[in-house]
Image (tube, rainbow, N blue to C red):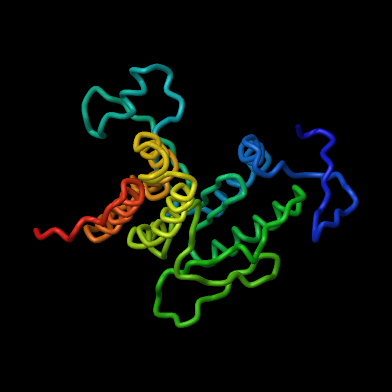
Amino acid sequence: MFDNVSISVLLDNFSSHSFSPATGVLQCSVLSPHLYSIYINSLPPLLRTVAHSQTTTHVPSPSPTSLDAYNALLAPSGVDGFGHIHFSTPINSLLFADNVAIFCSLSDVQTMLDLAADHSLTLGYRWSPTKCEVIYLKTRASSPVSLLLYGQVLPATDQFIYLGVPFANKGISSKSIATHRRSDTLATMATLNSVGACRSGFSLLLSSRLYKTFVRPKFEYDLAISTLLKQDIKVLESIQDKCLHIIVGGMPRPPQLC
């Protein structure tokens, strides 16, 4: 599948001459994220050379020798009869294939960006500065120092979507999750409705299964790792109510008095 690959560019019904890529993986292939992770696997250790105490955590041994040893590692600290094996693990980057997030102090992040640029030139790939954004911690400084990648200034933003999860300057932005999920969820539900997921189309059983398979994951994604407020939960419930009423028909339920 990855041998003798030939690529052509199609634009306005005209096809370019075919060429063979020197590096890279096939887009949309189920193997591509895993293969790219192997390809870029030397980047995280390089970035960890910049880590300090604020980006270092302690994790149990990843390879217990037996189930008993594994249970011992899960036991709370300070309990007699249980042994813990801890390793100091710097965590200053998150990677999923070519989706990378780095975090540290301002000066250290610039060093990490320089290392990432050097790493890309060594392995023959290139980051896209236009797709990168910087979230600065809120400080009294009116204009924080700009960060550069390949000599190009990276734009600043208050919020960034990483792997479908909205992040702000304090981590996951739980208050933005419901808003971020609404449009995508309702668009998917509208598509299913147009092909027959409604009262006059598919059976309720089939429609409910389509909803469970294609729609619910849209707005339930990342909820398990989010801290939601009561009003956020109400927004999510209203999205679900609207989707279900699209399937079964009728008017949305009236407001309830508590």
Residue at the farthest right position: 17
Task: Find residue 233 and report its image quarter.
Answer: bottom left
Quadrant in the picture for residue 35: top right
Expressed as whole percent of the image width and height from the top left, the position of residue 108 reads 54, 62
Tell me residue 235's x, y (percent).
Answer: 29, 59
Quadrant location, the C terminus: bottom left
Depth check, front residue: 58 or 167: 167
Q: Residue at x 27, y 29 (%)?
A: 75
Residue 64 image point, x, y percent:
42, 23
User: Left or right: where does residue 235 sit relative to residue 54?
Assistant: left
Rendered-image quadrant of the N terminus: top right
Residue 74 vertical position relative to residue 147 in the rendered view, above or below: above
Residue 78 image offset from top left, x and y in percent: 23, 33
- Front residue of 128 and 19: 19
Residue drawn at 59 percent across, 64 percent down: 110
Give 254 or 92, whichever is nearer the viewer: 254
